[in-house]
Amino acid sequence: MLEIQRIRNEKDAVITGLKKRNIDATETVESLLSIDQKWRNSKTELESISAELNLLAKEIGDLFKQGKQDEANTSKAKTATLKEKEALLKAEVDGFDTEIIQLLYQLPNVPNDIVPAGKSELDNITVEEVGSKREFDFTAVPHWDLAKKYDLIDFELGVKITGAGFPVYKGKGAKLQRALISFFLEEAEKAGYQEFIPPLVVNEASGYGTGQLPDKEGQMYYINEDDLYLIPTAEVPLTNIYRDVILPSEDFSIKMTGYTPCFRREAGSYGKDVRGLNRLHQFDKVEIVRIEHPSNSEKALIEMIDHVKGLLEKLGLHYRILRLCGGDTGFASALTYDFEVYSAAQEKWLEVSSVSRFDTFQSTRLKLRFKTNDKKTQLCHTLNGSALALPRIVASLMENHQTPDGIVIPDALRKYTGFDIID
């Protein structure tokens, strides 16, 4: 959530920045500033009345001590009138505050200066490409055919048990899945991330804290009876560990990782782009999350990008990194880099990770702050990234490492799988 102070101080910059997302926020910003001015006027009047009541309370006490009953009672009558006015002003201030919060919830984060303007993924910028496309001397087949050939994943069984988008992994397919999770977690631990096993369901406050609510409400699975949500990513419970926390000093750099299943309704998804593992309602992912001093945010983002690059290179996958344009950047993000792996059999790029800076957008909602050296409080910066999401990694491994004799397992995974080839 944007800070109202930022909108007060940088009104034009906020409006200009949001235009990169193809959003004209002028009306919303003007409404916010109008209500904010009313809030400040009422707040000033409320504080004045509260101060007057404090003085009257002292005065009444002194008058009673002096035996001046009539004067004390006159002042008490004045106090009653002021208290009525105070109550009305408190309700007015609270009402304005609620209006401001609801309007702020509607505004996405302002993109970083280096984010290009654009409407869709077609306007994203490729900043790096590593490796080259696999050339086959045989007819390569897509992962859904390989899964059937080697009995690794049963999509039809998932439909029977639950529905489309809930595949059943089995045999070496299940072991490959488990091996990747272990590999990603151990690599995160080597990089200094502390592992957590968080809940898979969260309350509404957690959803609002990281920006999934109200923006992504229709994309989350909701448990009506308990007013809880299935998590779309481990980012939500991990980041909310620090909701309503004030870190005691400026000396901090918090690095968390966690493996979880993730649940997304993916409403409106259909067609060839959702075939096989390309788009699922339930999938596994290892997430990395960082909470940083604002001065370290840029360095932390680079480190996270390098971490994901290292994983893909150890898996022997051809990938590229995209800087997302304003129109393709997530609601809460100020700056996002997507990693895409080339799917040799499908002849297309598949997104396997997003690494994002949120700056103070999440911490404003979370009330996540730290104590400065002069004992003031300041908002932290938050970042997160997929390291990595498994479905499309599995698809890419199967397709890019296929041979006429089977699917070759990358060296980095073999100690986790216990086998060198799927045949």
Image (cartoon, rainbow, N blue to C red):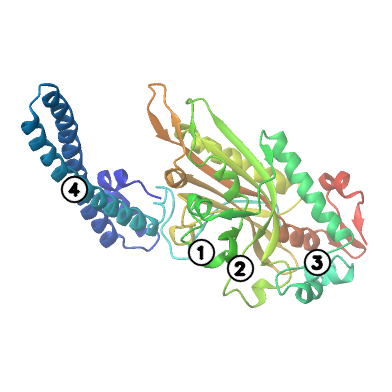
Name the secondary structure under disc 3: strand
Q: In this figure, which residue is indicated by the disc labeled 2?
A: 265
Real-space CA distance between mark 2 and mark 4, rounded to the nearest whole angstrom? 50 Å
Disc number at residue 217? 1
Q: Amino acid at mark 4?
A: Glu
Q: Is residue 39 visible?
A: no
Whether residues under marks 2 and 4 lie with C-beta atoms below 8 angstroms apart, the answer is no
Q: Nearer the viewer, mark 1 or mark 4?
A: 4
Whether residues under marks 3 and 2 lie with C-beta atoms below 8 angstroms apart, the answer is: no
Q: In this view of the protein, which residue sits in the foreground, 340 or 106?
A: 106
Earlier residue among tags 2 and 4 = 4
Three-letter amino acid code at the position of disc 2: Arg
Pinpoint residue 165: horizontal percent, then vertical percent: 70, 70
As displayed, is residue 74 above or below residue 28?
A: above
Residue located beneath label 3 in the image: 168
Q: Which label is found at residue 417? A: none
Question: Which is in the foreground here, disc 2 or disc 4?
Answer: 4
Q: Which residue is mark 4?
A: 84
Q: Residue at x 33, y 58 (%)?
A: 103
Q: SS for tag 1?
A: helix
Rendering coords of residue 28 (x, y %): 29, 60
Assign the C terminus to one quadrant of the image: bottom right
Q: Position of residue 221 (x, y in %)?
A: 60, 65
Q: Is residue 279 left or right of residue 55?
A: right
